[in-house]
């Protein structure tokens, strides 16, 4: 009986095993295709370490790519190398759109070296350089013009209210060349009480205030990136009414320097996560770190670098910092987002990952 049972069960198991193998073989291509779909449905963004400049690479579910800024020039093409390596590792053979927020060296400086490493489909910017400094800004703008003159890439000059042509996300222009979105976005328009107790900052006269800023809508998720937009312009976006409404992820303006991110602006955004592309000694100002860490609704501040100015008292927790104090290793932060509004942020130094459930709106 035991033998028979064992024999029957062995025969049954052999049959089941054979069926399972057959099923696995038969459904393998389908399973493989199905398994690729959830990843293909994600929006990914890499906050590349360019030492206090900006270089944020978005890859949409349709496979299109948008790089916001190109980091610095020089340094043996350090930043262009970091960007092109990240892009190629992510499977890109070209970058579809490169948005230049403004013409300062830490944003546009890397353009000539980048196009030597990876083709760019279209550049997007705010138009003419307005900072006639007879120095670096004019020089880097001129180098950028030389790249455009090769006609290997197209150029779009964007205005507030425009939607960028990138597919898989909706990217709405909020600020450009000193002009701002004329009316509130859907979800915006709330009165902002903080405006009554605060005053305007003096008007910034540099390229910073002309930053080309965008709001990215991806399903239920909203990501705001305004380049180096300064406090005077921020105030006009949220006072007397908040034209932007709440966002999920705030790419901290101006690398966390205190010329941007006023409390009335940051508090109005009510972002869940702030990601700061600061360097060890550039951006990451103590007042901005304080504003962010007190901001209503903020669950986590992530930083590309430990800020020496902020010191242990004001920096975010170590697990949320890509590059700690000390020798630089160029670690990045990565965002992987779902249309439902849930997302992960990953620290490339440790692979530490924090998951955020979709916000209930
Ligand atoms: Zn900058």
Image (cartoon, helix red, strand yellow):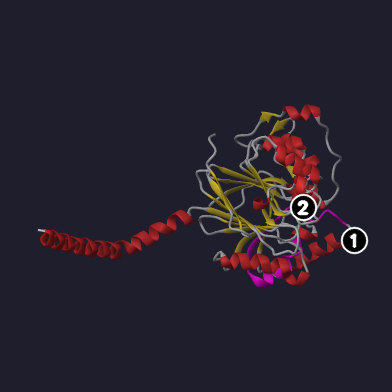
The answer to whether 6 appears left or right of 211 in the picture is left
Which residue is tagged 2? 307
Residue 330 found in image quarter: bottom right
Tell me, for residue 242, which label it has, or none.
none
**Residue at 72% across, 68% down:** 78
Residue 1 found in image quarter: bottom left
Q: Choose between 212 and 91: the one closer to the eye.
A: 91
CA separation in Å, label 2 and label 1: 31 Å
Secondary-structure class at tag 1: loop
x and y percent of residue 286 in the render?
A: 80, 45
x and y percent of residue 90 in the render?
A: 56, 64
The answer to whether 94 appears left or right of 317 in the picture is left
x and y percent of residue 215 in the render?
A: 64, 45
Q: Is mark 1 within 8 Å of ligand 1?
A: no
The magenta-colored residue range is 108-132
Q: Is residue 296 visible?
A: yes
Secondary-structure class at tag 2: loop
Q: In which of the image's four quarters is ligand 1 placed? A: bottom right
Which residue is tagged 1? 134
x and y percent of residue 295 in the render?
A: 70, 37
Foreground: disc 2 or disc 1: 2
Compared with 30, 178 (above or below) is above
**Residue at 73% across, 53% down:** 126
């Amino acid at each position: 009986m035991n033998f028979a049972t064992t024999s029957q069960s062995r025969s049954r198991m052999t049959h089941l095993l054979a069926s399972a193998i057959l099923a696995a073989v038969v459904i393998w291509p389908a399973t493989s295709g199905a398994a690729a779909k959830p990843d293909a449905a994600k929006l990914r963004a890499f906050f590349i370490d360019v030492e206090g400049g900006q270089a944020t690479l978005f890859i949409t579910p349709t496979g299109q790519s948008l790089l916001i800024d190109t980091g610095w020039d020089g340094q043996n093409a350090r930043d262009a190398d970091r960007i092109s390596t990240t892009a190629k590792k992510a499977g890109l053979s070209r970058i579809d759109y490169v948005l230049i927020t403004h013409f300062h060296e830490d944003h546009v400086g890397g353009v000539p070296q980048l196009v030597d490493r990876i083709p760019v489909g279209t550049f997007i910017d705010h138009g003419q350089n307005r900072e006639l400094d007879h120095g670096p800004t004019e020089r880097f703008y001129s180098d950028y013009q030389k790249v455009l003159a090769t006609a290997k890439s197209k150029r779009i000059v964007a205005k507030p209210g425009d939607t960028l042509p990138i597919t898989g996300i909706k990217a709405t222009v909020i600020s450009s060349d000193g002009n701002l979105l004329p009316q509130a976005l859907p979800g915006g328009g709330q009165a902002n009480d903080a405006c009554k107790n605060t005053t305007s900052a003096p008007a910034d006269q540099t390229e910073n205030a002309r930053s080309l800023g965008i709001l990215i809508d991806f399903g239920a998720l909203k990501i705001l990136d305004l380049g180096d937009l300064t406090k005077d312009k921020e105030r006009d976006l949220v006072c007397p009414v908040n034209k932007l409404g709440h966002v999920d992820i705030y790419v901290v303006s101006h690398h966390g320097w205190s010329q941007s991110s006023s409390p009335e602006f940051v508090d109005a955004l009510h972002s869940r996560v702030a990601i700061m592309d600061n360097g060890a000694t550039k951006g990451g100002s103590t007042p901005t770190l304080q504003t962010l860490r007190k901001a209503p609704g903020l669950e986590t501040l992530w930083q590309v670098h430990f800020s020496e100015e902020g010191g242990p008292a004001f920096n975010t927790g170590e697990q949320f910092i890509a590059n700690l104090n000390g020798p630089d290793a160029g670690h990045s932060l990565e965002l992987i987002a779902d249309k439902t509004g849930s997302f992960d942020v990953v620290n490339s130094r440790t692979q530490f990952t924090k998951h955020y459930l979709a916000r209930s709106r």
